[in-house]
Amino acid sequence: NAGVMQNPRHLVRRRGQEARLRCSPMKGHSHVYWYRQLPEEGLKFMVYLQKENIIDESGMPKERFSAEFPKEGPSILRIQQVVRGDSAAYFCASSPVVAGYEQYFGPGTRLTVT
Amino acid sequence: AQTVTQSQPEMSVQEAETVTLSCTYDTSESNYYLFWYKQPPSRQMILVIRQEAYKQQNATENRFSVNFQKAAKSFSLKISDSQLGDTAMYFCAFMIDQGGSEKLVFGKGTKLTVNP
């Protein structure tokens, strides 16, 4: 059973460009979470999705950020018009349906905005 | 608001010795889950141990055990017989089931170095 897959592992964007981060959850997992980790910080929750539904986006900035988890294909975190402050590691996690279950993390995408 | 505090930014321990990492949290919920995650230099987040708040018995996982004090809202991690491979950032986190959203709230982490 493959783990959570994220790509790309490293992404460099110039200010004003768009960044697209992809996450494929573990097989059988229908819950996807995105977290952001700034340097020297813990992970901060951004958004929680199930297939075709955003359940909780309370941690996501209101502008420039969006997320989706379509019926087919990976979950996408999209950042439009990136700024230097968006430079961070973005982690995706997935879990099965059971409440309180472990979230399995992907290896993360390190975004650098130049 | 739910918060997690890890008061030790950095710690070090000699190989084969025991070390305890501290974690306190703040929540008004009565039912929640607590976790310790390890993040080695590869940055991969790895679950170390998990505890349900309704269980009084402290969780153990091989060399890793917790001291869960619900009234004090304390959840410390003890690593016995430390190994060089335990060198990593350790994050304490908790999760509540709030309206169907099971997000993790993380502390800022403790950087643990195991010295040979």
Image: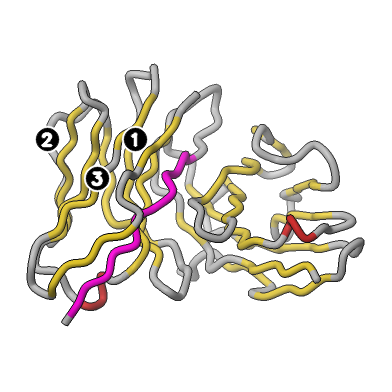
- The quadrant where residue B70 appears: top left
Q: Quadrant of residue A87?
A: bottom right
Q: Mark 3 lies on which chain?
A: B
Note whether B66 is above or below A83 in the view shown.
above
Callout 1 amino acid:
Tyr
- Give how far across and how far down residue A103 sits, in percent: 45, 50
The way the protein has been coloured in the rendering is: secondary structure
Secondary structure mostly taken by the magenta-highlighted segment of the chain? strand
Where is residue A32? Give x, y as percent: 59, 48
Marked residue nearer the N-terminal end (3 or 2) = 3
> Taking the image as drawn, is residue A79 in sight?
yes
The stretch drawn in magenta includes residue B19: no
- On whether disc 1 and disc 2 are found on a single subunit, the reply is yes
Residue bearing the label numbered 1: B33
Q: What residue type is labelled 3?
A: Ser
Task: Residue B62: tell me if it is visible.
Answer: no
Q: Position of residue A8 (x, y in %)?
A: 69, 73
Please state which amino acid type lies under the numbered disc 2: Gln
Range covered by the magenta-colored residues = B104-115
Checking the image for residue B22, the label placed there is 3
* SS for dot 3: loop
Image-based side of B41 in relation to A5, left or right: left
Marks 1 and 2, how far apart at CA: 13 Å
- Dot 1: element: strand
In the picture of the structure, the residue carrying the numbered disc 2 is B57
